[in-house]
Image (cartoon, helix red, strand yellow):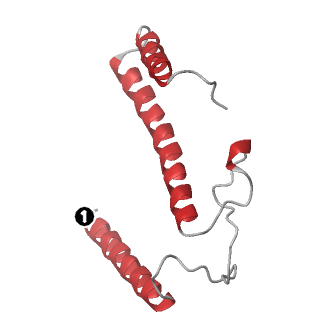
Amino acid sequence: MLPNIPPKLFSLSAVVVGYILIDDMTANEQNAVGNWLMLVAQVLSTNAFYRAVMQERGLEPVGSTETGRNNADTFAVTGSQSSGNINMGTSSDGETLKMLEKVVRALEQEIENIKRAL
């Protein structure tokens, strides 16, 4: 859990930690650590956004998000939805299937392009 500190102080602490980390590292080491930290940030940001999307669709997390428990893949199904058939927004199952088939074809094409390039 994050401490209750003002947003400006929270941001300033990131700047201070960043400056402390650069003192004893080469440019490549700084780049590696910076990229690792950005990846951590992207994972957190993506998970938070996906939770917001699921809540918007009416699929609430099973446990409380305030407990610190990782519920990223455990969403309760509400209403008339069954666990085997979750309605994603307003698209029908047929539309969803068509979209997934297009994605699969695009991935297969990309795999073939990569194989030819090798």
Q: Nearer the viewer, residue 52 or 29?
A: 52
Q: Residue at x 37, y 27 (%)?
A: 31
If the image is split into quadrants, where does the C terminus sit?
A: bottom left
Residue lying at the far top of the rendered structure: 23
- Quadrant assignment for the N terminus: top right
The residue depicted at 42 percent of the width and 17 percent of the height is 15
**With 83 as the anchor, is 43 left or right in this view?**
left
Where residue 73 appears, as percent x and y from the top left, is 65, 60
Q: Residues within 10 Å of mark 1 (few under 14, many from 20)?
A: few
Residue farthest bottom in this picture: 94
Dot 1: what SS? helix
Number of numbered discs: 1
Q: Tell me the kind of residue under disc 1.
A: Ala
Task: Give the answer, above or below, for where 10 lies relative to 107.
Answer: above
Residue drawn 51% across and 38% down? 40
Which of 3 and 103 lies nearest the eye of the viewer? 3
Q: Position of residue 2 (x, y in %)?
A: 63, 29
**Residue drawn at x 68%, y 49% as measured from the top left:** 65
Which residue does the numbered mark 1 point to in the structure image? 117
- Quadrant in which residue 100 is drawn: bottom left
- The image shows residue 82, relative to residue 35, as above or below, that is below
The image quadrant of residue 4 is top right
